[in-house]
Amino acid sequence: MAARVVNLDEVWAALKECAPGYSVRKSDHVWIILHPTQKNVVARLPLGKHGRRMNAEIEAGHVRQMARAFEIEECMQKRIPSAYG
C-alpha cells in the first residue's frame, strides 16, 4: 500500500491560515518550521523525494505530526483533508 502524500504548496497555504506568522528555514535535509506563539516547538518536514523543490510531495504522516506538535490539528484537518482521510 502506498503512503498518502501531500503537496507542500497545500501545507504552506494551510499553515498561513492555521498558524499565521509561522516561519520556515531550509536545512540540508528538512524544512524547519517555527510556530509564532510556541517558541519551544519546532517541526521538521522532509525536503521531499526530489530535494529542495518548493512544490514537492511529502508523506501525510509528517504533516499530521507537525499539526499535533503545533496543536493545530483541527484547522489542518479542515484545510488538508487528504492527509487525514
Image (spheres, rainbow, N blue to C red):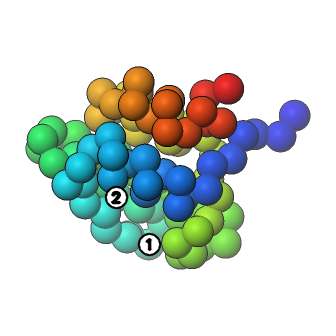
Q: Nearer the viewer, residue 9 or 5?
A: 9
Callout 1: SS = loop
Quarter of the image with the N terminus in it: top right
- Is residue 85 depicted above or below 31 in this figure? above
Q: Residues within 10 Å of mark 2 (few under 14, many from 20)?
A: some
Label count reads 2
What residue is at 65 percent from the left and 36 percent from the top?
82
Q: Quick check: 22 left or right of 14? A: left
Q: Which residue is mark 1?
A: 28
Q: Nearer the viewer, residue 43 or 8?
A: 8
What residue is at 49 percent from the left and 39 percent from the top?
79
Q: Quick check: 2 left or right of 76? A: right
Mark 1 belongs to which amino acid? Answer: Asp
Observer-side mark, 1 or 2, equals 2
- Name the spot of residue 58 as percent of width and height, x first: 62, 53
Disc 1/disc 2 C-alpha distance (Å): 10 Å
Q: Which residue is mark 2?
A: 32
Callout 2: SS = strand
Which label sits on residue 57?
A: none
Q: Residue pushed farthest right?
A: 1
- Name the spot of residue 23 as percent of width and height, x first: 25, 60
Q: Nearer the viewer, residue 32 or 81?
A: 81
- Name the spot of residue 28 as percent of width and height, x first: 44, 72
What residue is at 52 percent from the left and 72 percent from the top?
54
Q: Residues within 10 Å of mark 1 (few under 14, many from 20)?
A: few
Q: Residue 73 sits in which quadrant?
A: top left
Quarter of the image with the C terminus in it: top right
What residue is at 53 percent from the left and 53 percent from the top?
10
Mark 2 belongs to which amino acid? Answer: Ile
- Name the spot of residue 56 as percent of width and height, x first: 62, 65
Q: Are marks 1 and 2 in contact (CB under 8 Å)?
A: no
